[in-house]
Amino acid sequence: MTLIVDIQKKLPSYGLEVQFTAEGAALGILGSSGSGKSMTLRCIAGIDTPTSGSIILNNRILYDSRRGINLPSRDRNLGFLFQNYALFPHLTVAQNVGYGLKGKPKAVIQQRVAGQLTALKLADCCDRYPHQLSGGQQQRVALARALATEPDLLLLDEPFSALDTHLRSELEKLLINTLSRYSGLALFVSHNLEEAYRICQNLLVLSAGKVIAAGEKQTIFDHPGSLTVAQLTGCKNYSRIQPITRQKVQALDWDCLLSTADPVSIKHTHVGVRAHQIIFLENLFLGQSSQANTIPAWLAWTSETPHRMTLYLKLGAPPTHSEDYHLQAEVPKEKWEGLKDRPQPWLIYLDPSRLLLLHSNPA
């Protein structure tokens, strides 16, 4: 399965200009609110029409402005899963799942509906109506309906955003398992970085209607390139830089000298480090801070989740208040238990191979 998208659409606040090719593994479309993620899916689905461009699925033209081709949604052979379920309230679960199969032989409809109900653990709900279901059940019905037509392309627009944490986790596992058996192509829109990372092998990052990164997910995380991509992929720590040598920079906002593994070029304006990649050294002797990228740090503030602690660190001098910090570090609570009673300052190490050299704007 191959999808080729090259579309432009004039919008009130910016112009959507999206070009990409997707094939094989599920593609995650990542970006902040208003970046053009959902509009891109709506144009592919035929719900909205681009101003110009083309959309080709398996050598079949869905849209081409120059040729005057614009297939209606019903003829594009795709499934669309919305965040608000969009079930028909007057139809049962089985009727909702089979809705897109009208016109097919009754035996085919019954077989496909039964297969989807079983696969998505809905067999006991077939005669219920949407208002009799939980949110998680409703979304599973919507997914079963999207898959029942055996679409070439499955579009998922933030399908878990209306669900609580437990249901999100359960449905995410179900979706990963479902996609492993799905023979078509899937596009998964999300603003949740970790969710997109778990579900998709490849990522497309949008900002203000434009593609600013595309490729294998780990490559984008390890080498985001621009400050915007680093931020959208969860990097919380970044500083303006002054290049010193080809592999040394002054981090202006952190007030420290750093060695880098990658060579510094004139296009680089910032350095970044991900919160979970800050290393706390066991050695307490401050004399060690003379070694490259080893810096004394004081704790300004903490916040916690059930399993992790975020430590807000001031480099080089004690903080004067809770907002006086340079870096956010994330550590498991087990690590925190061994760290919290150690005298300050702590020594942190910023591994040169983990430092991100960034430019201000997408290339």
Image: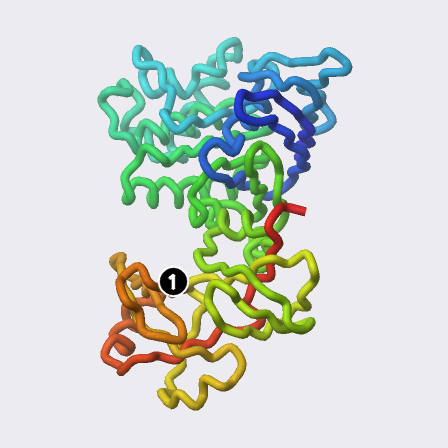
Give above or below for 87 relative to 235.
above
Q: Is residue 221 left or right of residue 17?
A: left
Q: Where in the figure is residue 128, as x and y percent of width and height?
A: 26, 20
State the residue lying farthest toward the right.
67
Can residue 3 be seen here? yes
Q: Residue at x 36, y 31 (%)?
A: 140
Give above or below for 283 relative to 310.
below
Q: Is residue 239 left or right of residue 95?
A: right
- Quarter residue 122 falls in: top left
Q: Is residue 60 left or right of residue 147?
A: right
Count of all numbered marks drawn on residues in the image: 1
The amino acid on which the numbered mark 1 sits, given as a three-letter code, is Gln
Secondary element at image label 1: strand
Q: Residue at x 39, y 45 (%)?
A: 173
Q: Which residue is mark 1?
A: 328
Quarter of the figure that contains the N terminus: top right
- Quarter residue 262 falls in: bottom right
Q: Camera-side residue: 174 or 107?
A: 174
